[in-house]
Image (tube, coloured by chain):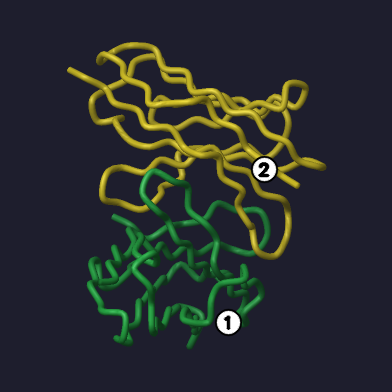
Amino acid sequence: DTEVTQTPKHLVMGMTNKKSLKCEQHMGHRAMYWYKQKAKKPPELMFVYSYEKLSINESVPSRFSPECPNSSLLNLHLHALQPEDSALYLCASSRRGVSPLHFGNGTRLTVT
Amino acid sequence: GDSVTQMEGPVTLSEEAFLTINCTYTATGYPSLFWYVQYPGEGLQLLLKATKADDKGSNKGFEATYRKETTSFHLEKGSVQVSDSAVYFCALSHTGANSKLTFGKGITLSVRP
């Protein structure tokens, strides 16, 4: 069982829809991450939150909007996505400093 | 910049065969090194890690040793099982606030009965 919980597991949305991905952890980790993973590729970093503040944005298009309401929750708001945004979106968390990331099982997003 | 190079795949082995997956890295300083595994339909799980030269990480029968002189972190297992079939990613990160990971391309391992 993963200690990072992501919902929903699957999401199909049209290009004009607005949807949100949710991530929750209760390990007391103060760094949280969003990654995008295309098939047969390694995960690509999108955003990093440290102590609920956005610390890294890897030049992600504005149609992806992250939010960290508190230390346990991380959201990714989606709007006007393109079909090429279809991918597995992974959330992760870690303690500060050099420590392993704990990943959720991801949300499989399909944009039609 | 940092980079991680993994051997080309996929790799197909028979059950109980010996496994080696090569990983080399380029980085400044002294990064920490990781192996992550991704089973079908799941996220990534930390398999093992090493934080300094000559450290050996081990878990579930897998081992890898941090070799500074050859900048390598090869993954080995003496006897693979069908349940080891997955994608394996080598990765590194530096000390810092955000533990930003640099991943290799990943390699798919299939173990046949």
Q: Residue furthest left?
A: B113
The chain to which mark 2 is attached is: B
Quarter where residue B11 is shown: top left
- List the residue tagged with mark 1: A52
In the rendered image of this protein, which colour is used for chain B?
Answer: yellow
Above or below, A87 relative to B45: below
Secondary structure beneath disc 1?
loop
User: Which of the two residues, A23 or A2, is positioned nearer the viewer here?
Assistant: A23
Cβ–Cβ below 8 Å for labels 1 and 2? no
The amino acid pointed to by label 1 is: Glu
Counting every numbered tag in the picture gives 2
Label drawn at residue B92: none
Subunit of mark 1? A
Q: Residue at x 38, y 83 (%)?
A: A80
Residue at horizontal 53%, vertical 70%? A32
B62 to the left or right of B51: left
| Residue A67 in picture, x, y percent from top left | 49, 84
Colour-to-chain, green: A
**What's the residue at 75%, 40% (across, down)?**
B27
Tag 2 residue: B32
